[in-house]
Image (cartoon, helix red, strand yellow):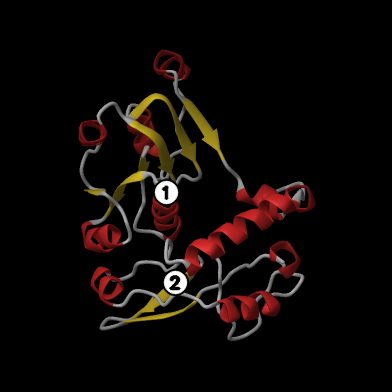
Amino acid sequence: GDWVLVHGAGGGVGLAAVEIGRALGARVIARAGAAKHAALRARGAEVVLDSAAPFRDTVRQVSGSGVQVVFDSLGGDVFDESLRCLAEGGTLLTIGYAAGGIPQLPLNLLLLKNIGVAGFNWGTDVGWAPGDNRQTYAPQVRALWRQLLEWWQTGKIAPTALHSAAASAANPPALPTRPAISATIAATSSAGVVAPGAPSPAMSIVGTRASSSTSVRGPIVPWLPPSSWIA
């Protein structure tokens, strides 16, 4: 029942945060452009705010004493305002700076509000970052993929990007079957490359290709874990 504020909720990463928050039982406040509000509500956001509007006062009003977690992929001024949205003991998770500015951290605010800021570099876990620690984190990564697949199969998450609010609401993605998941895992090579035509079980890396008149789902798969990590 904790409140979570997700910035950039209409993008692939933000949408994943919305759905995972709901799967964990959180109450989600999602910020995105107006065109994606209906789809975000359909995907579980309890409150949806326009990303073009101020948010601090509304977030504090909706949540009561503030949110327990802020998911910030934007940085810049959003970071500063988000710190002031946290409840006592809350945490801001910084994962990117799409707004263009890398914020400076006012340490006195952390002290006065008893709040924290955390970072998470997924590359450290899977070998993208300097220093390949994928073997160290392999057990945690295996557990993560199993959890995501379970949530997907039970309908708690739907890993597709939002290109059209109307199309997404009217045509929700089909849930995978166990044979389909098994086939996907089998098609994943030791290098983490999906065989041509294989579906993707990964969160937020299956998206849509959109044209001016329609939206057609299809795989957008830059990376998948080696099959040994999921087995």
Q: Residue at x 39, y 75 (%)?
A: 173
Q: Residue at x 35, y 67 (%)?
A: 162
Report whether 47 appears left or right of 78: left
Q: Is residue 75 visible?
A: no
Sequence-first tag of 2 and 1: 1
Question: From the image, which quarter does the C terminus lie in?
Answer: bottom right
| Depth order, front residue of 58/154 | 154
**Between residues 209 and 30, which one lies in front from this camera angle?**
30
Query: How far separated are the C-alphas under marks 2 and 1?
Result: 20 Å
Structural crowding at the residue carrying mark 2, measured as other residues with C-alpha within 10 Å and reported as few (<14), some (14–19) or many (≥20): many
The x and y percentages for residue 31 are: 29, 48
On screen, residue 50 above or below 162: above
- The residue tagged 2 is 207
**What residue sits right under mark 1 in the picture?**
21
Question: Which three-letter amino acid code belongs to the residue tagged 1?
Answer: Gly
Q: Secondary structure at mark 2?
A: strand
* Position in image of residue 55 (x %, y %): 24, 38
Q: Against 79, is 37 above or below? A: below
Closest to the observer, 125 or 28:
28
Q: What kind of residue is marked 2?
A: Gly
Residue 98 in the image, given as x and y percentages of width and height: 43, 49
Residue at 67 percent across and 65 percent down: it is 225
Q: Quadrant of the N terminus?
A: top left
Position of residue 197 measured from the top left corner of the image (x, y, whole percent)? 58, 86
- How crowded is the residue under tag 1: few (<14 C-alpha within 10 Å), some, or many (20+)? many
